[in-house]
Amino acid sequence: MNSPTTARDSSSPTRIVARSSMTDWIRACGLSGLAGMKIDKEELRRRLSMPQYLRLAMLDSIKKKDVDGGDEHFRSRSSDYDGTVPQSPIVVFINSRSGGRHGPVLKERLQQLISEEQVFDLLDVKPHEFVRYGLACLEKWGNNGDICAKETRRNIRVVVAGGDGTVGWVLGCLGELHQKGRDPVPPVAVIPLGTGNDLSRSYGWGGSFPFAWKSAIKRTLHQATTGPICRLDSWHVVLQMPGGEVIDPPHSLKATEDCHFDQTLEIDGGIPDKVNCYEGVFYNYFSIGMDAQVAYGFHHLRNEKPYLAQGPITNKIIYSSYSCTQGWFLTPCVSDPSLRGLKNILRIYIKKARCSEWEQIPVPRSVRAIVALNLHNYGSGRNPWGKLKPEYLEKRGFVEAHADDGLLEIFGLKQGWHASFVMVELISAKHIAQASSIRLEIRGGEWKDAFMQMDGEPWKQPMSSDYLTFLEIKRVPYQSLMINRE
């Protein structure tokens, strides 16, 4: 969780510790590390830019959604091309709607520093299109003997300018390369443009968009080409709910025809004739309960009144204010069952490390939100699991948490005051378990809906009083690759 392992040497972990917001601010402003090092713009462009014929061939293949769409650029390659292979080829995906007013300006700056064809606005080019057509174009011509295409494909790295959701989207699409054996998989660096930016923080890229951004972007691109590569677990989620119920799933959750659950755990109760199935992947956390309900309300408010979302600081102020309106701090004073503990609706089963048997674990009566966490950063850089002492780890049967250890840390949050103390790291969250697999069984009653979220993307989950809703989490068999700024 807090120490991804360098991909080049899995036996030598690269420690990444939780940072204070002040440290993040210093890093983002470029006041440490390479701040004193002048990076020449033209030299940077020479290292990052692909030859024009490769850029145009890749872009045409993407636009035409055809691997052969850029062939004419290879056939009509200019005689002026001297055969130079780019030293550190990079492509950038930017969510131009993120980062408040900075998105469009940042896009233009990146195009100036690299090339227009190597900077993809996610409104126009989707990551899976880049994987299926852009990279495939390079692979095809590399196999046909074009040395530049072959070396560019082998060395290419990806930078994502956006929030955690955008980074996860790109990582998920790059996962197609693992599934189809199309190695190597490009590693990913981050320019943080979101609100929480927990993935970005975990790999040293900071928690906010720097105000001295013009010089910081050059340093970021340079570090994206030189930083060590680390491994990151990703987690597959399967959701089965009774048919007839309707949800508005987040981007990370897709409808599927079949649900494949672990058959070694018997299902308590009947299964309806018709079920709806969804699946998706998360990289940082999954949660159920009040924190997801607050996130759901905030996202809807932001979508209905986009003028309120002018940047990360404004978003955090609105988010904090909104949480106070959802009963998070007033549980003892209300009788609404929807504001009580998750014990009323939830059963949790887990598989522990190196164990094939499912084990039911109790849901603490006081807990109103349960989080399964992969990284040490949650809620804009907080570390709710805490830095646990060896004696405590041994007593609870836990191990030190890492981002590539195949385990999720499961913890609970009580009422708002408890959550507030956890978020300022005065106390740790309520530790529940570490697990390699998780099964949630949810049944309604007085509760009509539950709220869930994956990596900051929330949704309202309807519940049936007659049938269970199932959610199972398992580790994806391959790991994603991240570039560590350190």
Image (cartoon, rainbow, N blue to C red):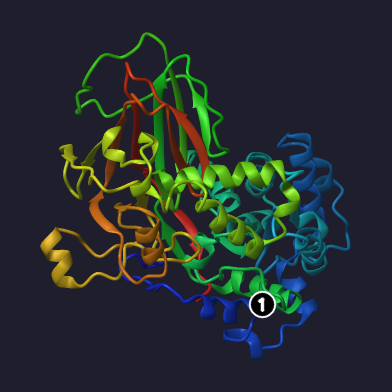
Q: Quadrant of residue 126?
A: top right
Residue 142 drawn at (x, y percent): 65, 50
Residue extending furthest top? 273
**Which residue corresponds to the image point at 38% horizontal and 29% vertical from the top-left?**
447
Residue 54 drawn at (x, y percent): 77, 53
Q: Is residue 59 left or right of residue 237?
A: right
Q: Nearer the viewer, residue 226 or 335?
A: 335
Q: From this view, report whether residue 366 is shown above or below residue 195.
A: above
Q: Nearer the viewer, residue 51 or 335?
A: 335
Task: Identify the element where label 1 is drawn.
Answer: helix
Task: Judge whether residue 429 can be spotted in this image.
Answer: yes
Task: Judge whether residue 346 can be spotted in this image.
Answer: no
Mark 1: few, some, or many residues within 10 Å (few <14, many ≥20)?
some
Q: Is residue 447 left or right of residue 486?
A: left
Q: From this view, report whether residue 363 is shown above or below residue 95.
A: above
- The quarter of the image holding the N terminus is bottom left
Residue extending furthest bottom? 36
Q: Nearer the viewer, residue 265 or 72?
A: 265
Q: Is residue 255 left or right of residue 430?
A: right
**Which residue corresponds to the image point at 16% horizontal and 67% vertical from the top-left?**
392
Residue 163 drawn at (x, y percent): 60, 56
**Which residue corresponds to the image point at 15% horizontal and 37% vertical from the top-left?**
357
For label 1, the residue is 219
Q: The residue under label 1 is which amino acid type?
A: Arg
Q: Quadrant of residue 267?
A: top left
**Which residue corresponds to the image point at 53% horizontal and 39% vertical from the top-left?**
252
